[in-house]
Image (cartoon, grey):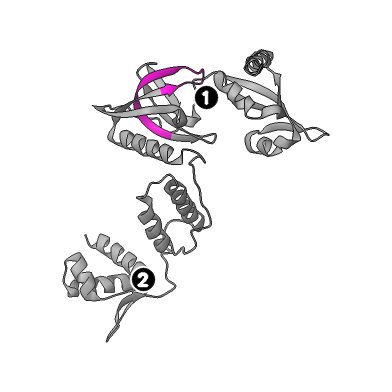
Amino acid sequence: MQINRLFEIVYILLDKKLVTSKELAKKFEVSTRTIYRDIETLSSAGIPVYMSKGKGGGISLLSDFVLNKTVLTNEEKNNILSSLKAVNSVNLSETDNALEKLSSLFGETNTDWIEVDFAAWYNADEEKNLFCNLKSAILSKNTVSFSYSSGKGENTNRHVCPLKLCFKGQSWYLYGYCSKRCDNRFFKLTRIKELSISDETFQKKAPSQIFSEKKILNDELIVLKLKLSKKMAYRVYDEFSTYIELEDGSFIAEIMYPKGEWIFNYIASFGEDCEVLSPEEIRHEIKIKLQKILNNYL
């Protein structure tokens, strides 16, 4: 169609700056006369395209031209480019060309002001491979099987219809229908092991806005109230939204956390700089676990 050819001619001129009518005719498999008519059409539409004759001549645009008549505002353009940069951070190389094309199309030369990497500092390659395999299963609608360690410390084998990859609270999750639980579930990617993609397909669809649901995680959440030393200030600022700073520089902080074995691992990550204030049963469990650890060194 002519409209598609006209659009691509503009992009080529934005990208290459100068091209001959013969090159365009060869690319689109049309005559040079057709290309001349296309150039006239673009010029009539207000696109500042012009032709120069002689050696080194050809078809080009004014050097400062961008498609500023697009329906997108500058803010919307920047949001699109920023989003592509973020998506590209999970190793989705197919976004590279889109980012390059849209940058040229929008006349944006400075797209390197933001860099996002969702991968963890550890096991980054393993997590990216898992992400890409799950993405392929979601797009092809193939069921997956894997070994999963729950928030209660239970290791189970799961058979799942993968519906969506989600990022929430500094972690990646797989959202899908679990045949073992007969319900939709979230699975933290770092707890998924021995992933296998089957030939079995499914037809289920994911809701458009998963995180708008009132209860999105199936683990029981409790409110942990902790006292943290001033040495943990950087973690308080990073991880807690509810806290008060005491006169000595220490903190009283609260956080919602899934109930289970993972609570102890989280609290232990603060070492001697953390005291559990409530709930009382968690405080009691911590005492028992610490005593068992101490017995290993007697």
Question: Is residue 253 in sight in this rendering?
Answer: no
Tag on residue 47?
2
Q: Residue at x 40, y 46 (%)?
A: 91
* Label 2 vs 1, first from the N-terminus: 2
Residue 47 in the magenta stretch? The answer is no
Q: Residue at x 50, y 58 (%)?
A: 112
Residue 294 at x, y = what percent? Answer: 66, 17
Disc 1 crowd rating (10 Å Cα; few below 14, some 14-19, many 20+) is few
Q: Nearer the viewer, residue 274 or 74?
A: 274
Kind of residue at disc 2: Ile
- Screen quadrant of the N terminus: bottom left
- Screen quadrant of the C terminus: top right
Question: Is residue 180 in sight in this rendering?
Answer: yes
Q: Nearer the viewer, mark 2 or mark 1?
A: 1
Q: Residue reaching furthest right?
A: 247
Residue 166 at x, y = what percent? Answer: 45, 34
* Segment tinted magenta in the rendering: 148-165
Q: How many marks?
A: 2
Disc 2 crowd rating (10 Å Cα; few below 14, some 14-19, many 20+) is some
Residue 207 at x, y = what percent? Answer: 40, 30
